Each structure stands twice: as C-alpha cells, then as structure tokens.
Image (spheres, rainbow, N blue to C red):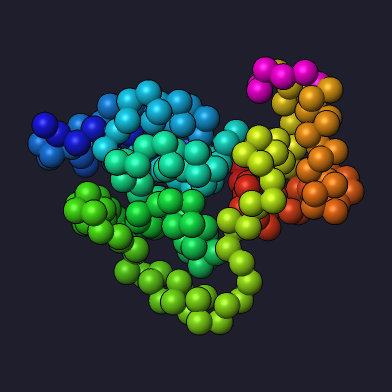
Amino acid sequence: MPVPVLLADEQALLRDGVAALLSHSTRYQVIGSTADGRDCVRLALRQQPGLIVFDCAMRGLSGLEAIRRIAPRCPQTRLLCLSGYEDSRWVRAAFDAGAHGYVLKRDGFDVLREAIDTVMRQRYFISPDIGHLLVDGLRRQDGPSFATTGALSAREREITQLFAEGLSARDISERLHVSIKTVGTHREHIMAKLGINGIAQLTRYALREGLTTLDP
C-alpha cells in the first residue's frame, strides 16, 4: 500500500509541485492538500496520514503550532518541514515541535525526495546547506528556539498569532466560534502571563517566537 501523504503550504504552486513529484512514485499517494494550519490539523486527525509535508509559517494557525497539536495524536505520522527560513531558531523550533526533517524550499526536488525517503525510514533529515547552522546554534547556546511559548496554552498561542496578524477581537471570535468576551479574557491572560501591554508588544512577541512572520 502506498504511504498516504498530506501537503500543507500556503503556496498552491508548491503543493502542486510536490504532488507532481510524488505522483511519479508508487510508494506515495497524496490524499489531501491545504493552505491552512487549522485545516491541516483537522485532516491529519481524521485521515492519519503516513507523512505530512508542511510549511512552518502558515497563516491562521502556524505550521509549528499545527505540528505541536498533531505530533502527540498521530504518533505514526512522519513530519517533514519544507521551509523558506534558514535561521537556526526555525530549524530548532520545527524539531522541538515534533518534525522529523527540515528541507529548504530552494533545495530542489532531488533533496526533497531524499528527505522524504529518509524520514520514512524512521530517520531524521536536515537540509545539507543548514546543518552547520543548527550545530553552531547549539554550540553558542545563543538563546532559546521559537518553541519557548510554553507559558501559553495552545488556544492562547493561536489568539496571539491572530492578533499579531491584524485581526480584531470580533474577527477572532467569529473565526474561533467563541464570544468577543472570551477573546478579551484570553488577551488579558496572555498579556498578564507575558508581562506586556498593548498589541504592538504582543506583535513583537509573536514575531520573536515564530508564531507569525507577517509575510505578505
């Protein structure tokens, strides 16, 4: 039986390219494709794919947060991050969240194919061009990875990301199907936990911790 694969990336062209690559192999079958982190979680929990190829910086619910939710509930699923970020903190954060591999989008299909085959052999993979960054970062111990948002709950991290991306309390309440009062209570708890005041500081925190990139 081919390995069922779920693709999660905001760029439709990239998802189509990866799907085309995998279509040439009888070992893999793409069973789902999404541009949304929350939808990625829903599909993963329902379909239990053998492999998820994901981007760590999706809007709505970041890829890192999606993987934090998926990894403990889909222990048999292999998780491969396909990212445009070469900062060692992104690499460390992806592995901290539960990823088994990290590939740069500029690497090309040959490296991606090798990465997929490697993680499916129950091994770890990191792009050859950034392995030294991870090692150098560990040697320097130059600060925590983005995964230091543990003080916040999963819902609080999600709301932090949405506020940082410019959504209003009403927008967030409609998206998450909760009351505006509940959103306001979460915001107060978040700011109290982090010791910050105002959306500007919350946005800087979200950027620093990798909850959002604010890319156009």
163 part of magenta stretch? no
Relative image position of residue 155 (x, y in whole percent): 66, 35
Between 9 and 74, the residue placed more toward the observer is 74
List the single residue furthest toward the bottom. 139
Between 157 and 13, the residue placed more toward the observer is 157
Q: Is residue 65 left or right of residue 167?
A: left
Give me the residue at 34% from left, 64% from top: 127
Q: Is residue 11 left or right of residue 157?
A: left
Relative image position of residue 215 (x, y in whole percent): 61, 46
Compared with residue 50, is residue 47 higher up or lower down, i.e. above or below?
Answer: above
Compared with residue 138, is residue 78 higher up or lower down, i.e. above or below?
Answer: above
Relative image position of residue 201 (x, y in whole percent): 82, 51
Give me the residue at 34% from left, 63% from top: 126
Compared with residue 91, is residue 73 higher up or lower down, i.e. above or below?
Answer: above
176 part of magenta stretch? yes
Q: In the picture, residue 108 is in which quadrant? A: bottom left
Relative image position of residue 189 (x, y in whole percent): 81, 40
Q: Which residues are magenta?
A: 175-180
Q: Is residue 111 left or right of residue 164?
A: left
Give me the residue at 35% from left, 49% from top: 80
Number of marks in the rendered image: 0
Specify whether residue 74 is in view.
yes
Give me the residue at 11% from left, 31% from top: 1
Q: Is residue 137 left or right of residue 206?
A: left
Check the picture and name the quadrant holding the C terminus: top right
Q: In the picture, residue 6 is in which quadrant? A: top left
Between 13 and 187, the residue placed more toward the observer is 187
Q: In the picture, residue 44 is in which quadrant? A: top left
